[in-house]
């Protein structure tokens, strides 16, 4: 089905920007569809200077609803085991979550969260700085620091906030940030809030980074900070950490790795990308989130004690925002127990990832070999990617489409991600759906 035309541009533009990074089911608006009544309805009410005009003119969501292609904000009615979800009365195999270890439904983790609520209540109602520090926050930070082979760690409400707070507090007006072009939005936003210059190097292109490092003057008493995702969230590929470490050393830069998609799963003990490359001591700062392998909500930055103490006392995300809830803290502690005690969980994850990679390739798909828990299947054309995704949904499989600019031009893809708890049957359903849809669309010859 062709996409609707955008009011100001062609159909590809319609789905770029934030749309590209969002989930997509290609279904009609849910029967309760009222939530999607937006914008254009009120175009006639514009007055010349009204701030709301941009909202009144906004048509994207309604255009997609009209085309039967709107697929965001799909309400999951039930998710009893994590690998299967119910949406609109349909059971789907979840191949689009970041619940890599499947811990959101682990009995030990769920019991710990309930106990924490009994002991501390549902929220901390304040920041770490003031009334929001619990004994279990300190225990969690100490354990995380040890787990990550770092001296210290400080947490804040989400991974997004952690990046924004840490980057903005560390990089000042005389400093320069060198960031991979495909870094997560929270890194970009942190750099925007910092007064530092932010230079972007081509994705995973170390020569481009070296060129920027060599040719960029730093202000008086300024420093250099290289920032990269550890596993890139859309393509699923790994940062070239050894070369980044070498560049950081050569140019006296500090290296920060956002390991949101790797902590808990990569490396011999699951501590992430630096461990995977045997370079834990050479990465200065590790950022992470609790919203993926740690099965809840929150974020952390770990590194040298002096630097973490500085962030603790100066990051606005720490000082001016409430601390991680007791249930989430307990979830992290219980998840750490399991990550440390059950390496077989990581083995099952990699077995599942390898099986899916081999299965998808055997069907003829071009799969980006990321090395992490994300397998991105290149479809190419935007419209076919969205159509493919819609049909997968109808076949009972939930994945995430990724379009430019989140994917390289002409390389729109379906981002699939796996869990240690996916069963053989779950994986069979996913492979059968990919096969059926490719036959229906007549792609792969
Ligand atoms: C690389 C990366 N960094 C940071 C975040 C933000 O984490 P959170 O969901 O905890 O805000 C994400 C989440 O998608 C991510 O993929």
Image: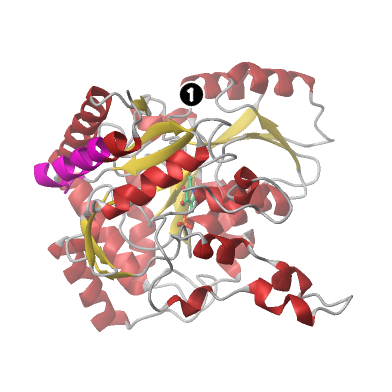
Q: Is residue 341 left or right of residue 229?
A: left
- Front residue of 424/386: it is 386
Q: Is residue 307 visible?
A: yes
Decide if residue 228 is on the left or right side of residue 359. Answer: right
Relative side of 65 to 427, left or right:
right
Residue 41 % position (x, y): 66, 77
Residue at the image point whose x is 39% and y is 63% from the top: 297
Q: List x then y, in percent, for residue 344.
A: 13, 39
Which corner quadrant of the image does residue 369 belong to? top left
Q: Is residue 96 visible?
A: no
Q: Which residue is depicted at the point 15% across and 63% down?
A: 108
Q: Which residues are magenta?
A: 420-436
Picture residue at 78% right of the left edge, 82% below the top: 45
Foreground of the two, 57 or 322: 57
Q: Position of residue 166 (x, y in %)?
A: 59, 52
Q: Nearer the viewer, residue 388 or 193?
A: 388
Residue at the spot of label 1: 240
**Mark 1 packing: few (<14 Cα in 10 Å), some, or many (20+)?**
some
Asked if residue 426 lies in the magenta stretch, the reply is yes
Q: What is the residue that sits farthest to the right in this orientation?
A: 48
Image quarter in which the C terminus is found: top left
Q: Is residue 177 magenta?
A: no
Q: Is residue 372 above or below residue 362?
A: below
Name above or below for residue 192 compared with residue 203.
below
Q: Secondary structure at mark 1?
A: loop
């Amino acid at each position: 089905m062709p996409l609707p035309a955008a009011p100001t541009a062609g159909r590809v533009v319609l789905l770029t920007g934030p749309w590209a990074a969002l989930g997509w089911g290609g279904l009609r608006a849910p029967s309760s569809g009222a939530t999607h009544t937006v914008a254009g309805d009120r175009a006639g009410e514009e007055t010349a200077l009204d701030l709301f005009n941009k909202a009144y003119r906004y048509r994207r969501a309604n255009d997609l609803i009209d085309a039967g292609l709107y697929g965001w904000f799909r309400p999951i009615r039930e998710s009893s085991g994590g690998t299967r979800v119910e949406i609109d009365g349909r059971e789907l195999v979840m191949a689009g979550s970041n619940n890599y270890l499947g811990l959101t439904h682990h009995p030990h983790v769920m019991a710990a969260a309930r106990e924490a609520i009994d002991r501390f209540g549902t929220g901390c109602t304040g920041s770490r700085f003031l009334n929001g520090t619990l004994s279990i926050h300190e225990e969690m930070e100490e354990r995380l620091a040890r787990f990550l082979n770092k001296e210290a760690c400080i947490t804040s409400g989400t991974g997004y906030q952690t990046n924004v707070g840490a980057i903005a507090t560390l990089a000042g007006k005389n400093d320069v940030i060198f960031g991979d072009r495909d870094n997560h939005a929270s890194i970009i936003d942190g750099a925007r809030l910092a007064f530092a210059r932010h230079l972007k190097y081509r994705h995973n292109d170390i020569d481009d980074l070296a060129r920027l490092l060599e040719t960029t003057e730093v202000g008086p008493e300024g420093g250099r900070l290289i920032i990269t995702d550890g596993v890139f969230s859309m393509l699923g590929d790994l940062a070239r950490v050894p070369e980044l470490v070498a560049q950081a050393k050569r140019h006296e830069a500090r290296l920060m790795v956002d390991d949101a998609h790797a902590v808990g799963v990569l490396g011999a003990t699951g501590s992430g990308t630096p461990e995977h490359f045997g370079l834990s001591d050479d990465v200065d700062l590790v950022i992470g989130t609790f919203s993926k392998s740690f099965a809840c909500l929150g974020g952390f930055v770990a590194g040298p004690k002096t630097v973490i103490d500085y962030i603790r006392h100066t990051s606005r995300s720490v000082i001016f925002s409430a601390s991680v809830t007791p249930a989430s803290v307990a979830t992290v502690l219980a998840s750490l127990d399991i990550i440390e005690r059950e390496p077989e969980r990581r083995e099952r994850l990699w077995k599942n990832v390898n099986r899916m990679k081999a299965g998808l390739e055997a069907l003829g798909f071009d799969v980006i070999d990321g090395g992490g828990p994300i397998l991105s299947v290149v479809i190419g054309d935007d419209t076919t990617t969205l159509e493919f995704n819609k049909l997968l949904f109808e076949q009972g499989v939930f994945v995430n489409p990724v379009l430019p600019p989140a994917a390289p031009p002409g390389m729109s893809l379906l981002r699939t991600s796996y869990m240690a708890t996916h069963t053989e049957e779950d994986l069979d359903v996913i492979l059968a759906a990919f096969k059926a849809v490719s036959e229906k669309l007549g792609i792969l010859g």
